[in-house]
Amino acid sequence: MGITVTRSELISKLKIIGFSGPFSGGKHQFMAKGTLKLRIPNPHKNNEIGIGLLKELLRQADIDLN
């Protein structure tokens, strides 16, 4: 089993670092920080976001993993 995070945990942590939302938008909700818009995955059956998708979301949010 790999590292996962729930959608609600992701949203909570993004709010801590200055993102607002989530807002409705097309097929996915999004969160915003300044001019940056970050699409948030829809809730999955088990409500978990895997490490691969989490890394991609953090990269899109311009969050350095190093």
Image (cartoon, grey):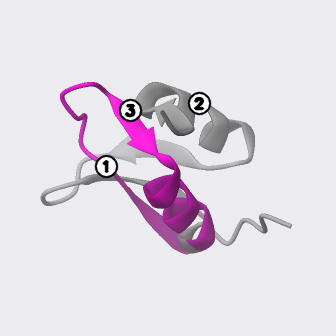
Number of marks in picture: 3
The image quadrant of residue 33 is bottom right
According to the picture, the residue beneath numbered tag 2 turns out to be 12
| Amino acid marked by disc 1 | Pro
According to the picture, the residue beneath numbered tag 1 turns out to be 41
Q: Which residues are magenta?
A: 34-59
Q: Earlier in the sequence, mark 2 or mark 1?
A: 2
According to the picture, the residue beneath numbered tag 3 turns out to be 48
| Amino acid marked by disc 3 | Glu
Callout 1 secondary element? loop
Callout 3 secondary element? strand
On screen, residue 31 above or below 12: below
Q: Residue furthest front?
A: 1
How crowded is the residue under tag 1: few (<14 C-alpha within 10 Å), some, or many (20+)?
A: some
Residue 42 belongs to magenta span: yes
Image coords of residue 42 (percent x, y): 24, 43
